[in-house]
Amino acid sequence: TLSALRAQWQADAHKQEQSLAELQSALGLPTPPNRIECYDVSHTQGVATVGAMIVFEQGVPAKRLYRKFNIASQGRFADSTSIGAPDDFASMEEMLTRRFRRWQSAEEAAAGPGSKPDASFSILPDLIIVDGGKGQLGRVVKVLENAGLADRVSVVGLAKQEEEIFFPHKSSSLKLPRHSQGLYLIQRIRDEAHRFGITAHRARRSSR
């Protein structure tokens, strides 16, 4: 039994390495994306909006690093015509803005004595995956540019209908081979973000 479990673990580890190597090559990343963050927004017609942040390390979920964001006011980041209406773009921008403000705060606190940074926010991801197409991706790119991180953090958008991968400032999209380990990993990450977001949204909606 131990031998079988060891063989299964080794096979899984090989798949994780393969999937990360495939993503590095397909997405043109300088290194394998050992820390991947994925973001999703969940609500019911704009009510009880929750942003979900999940983290994968070395190709496996790091659930201790998951975080949720209660989106208090979509209008803060929305166009004037969108205030009061469900706006996933504005919610995504607010969530990512708050996430990287936490990173900046952790950077400042690290210089002080006795600091204990939150690993969810104090470490920059190698890759951000946004659940959505060009609209959501554009908002995240805007946040990264405002934070001065556009050259340090890679980001792509994943459109669910055709599993298309969108890149910043590019009109063309990418479709990974149907049975590639890289595609399986991206789908798993996206589905985990959706699951975590839906669970957090339902809890917030119930409490309301």
Image (cartoon, helix red, strand yellow):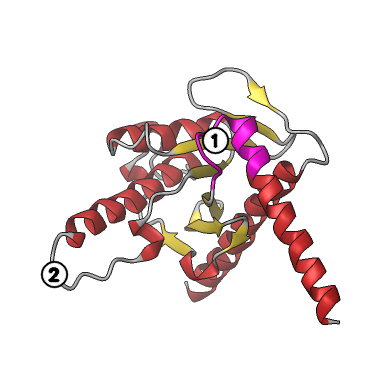
Image quadrant in which you'd find residue 119: bottom left
Q: Residues within 10 Å of mark 1 (few under 14, many from 20)?
A: many
Three-letter residue code for mark 2: Pro
* Residue 14, horizontal then vertical, whole percent: 73, 55
Q: Is residue 136 visible?
A: no
Residue depicted at x 18% and y 61%: 109
Image quadrant in which you'd find residue 106: bottom left
* Residue 62, horizontal then vertical, whole percent: 54, 65
How far apart are the two marked residues, 2 and 1, measured between alpha carbons? 37 Å
Residue indicated by mark 2: 113
Q: Earlier in the sequence, mark 2 or mark 1?
A: 2
Instruction: Please determine whether, in this image, residue 159 is positioned above or below residue 10.
Output: above
* Viewport quadrant of the N terminus: bottom right
Residue reaching furthest to the top: 171
Q: Camera-side residue: 5 or 79? A: 5
Residue depicted at x 73% and y 36%: 161
- Tag 2 and tag 1, C-beta contact below 8 Å: no
For residue 156, which numbered disc appears in the image?
1
Span shown in magenta: 21-33
Q: Residues within 10 Å of mark 2 (few under 14, many from 20)?
A: few
* Residue 9, horizontal then vertical, whole percent: 75, 67
Q: Is residue 188 left or right of residue 73?
A: right
Residue depicted at x 49% and y 71%: 64
* Residue 73, horizontal then vertical, whole percent: 35, 52
Nearer mark to the viewer, of 2 and 1:
2
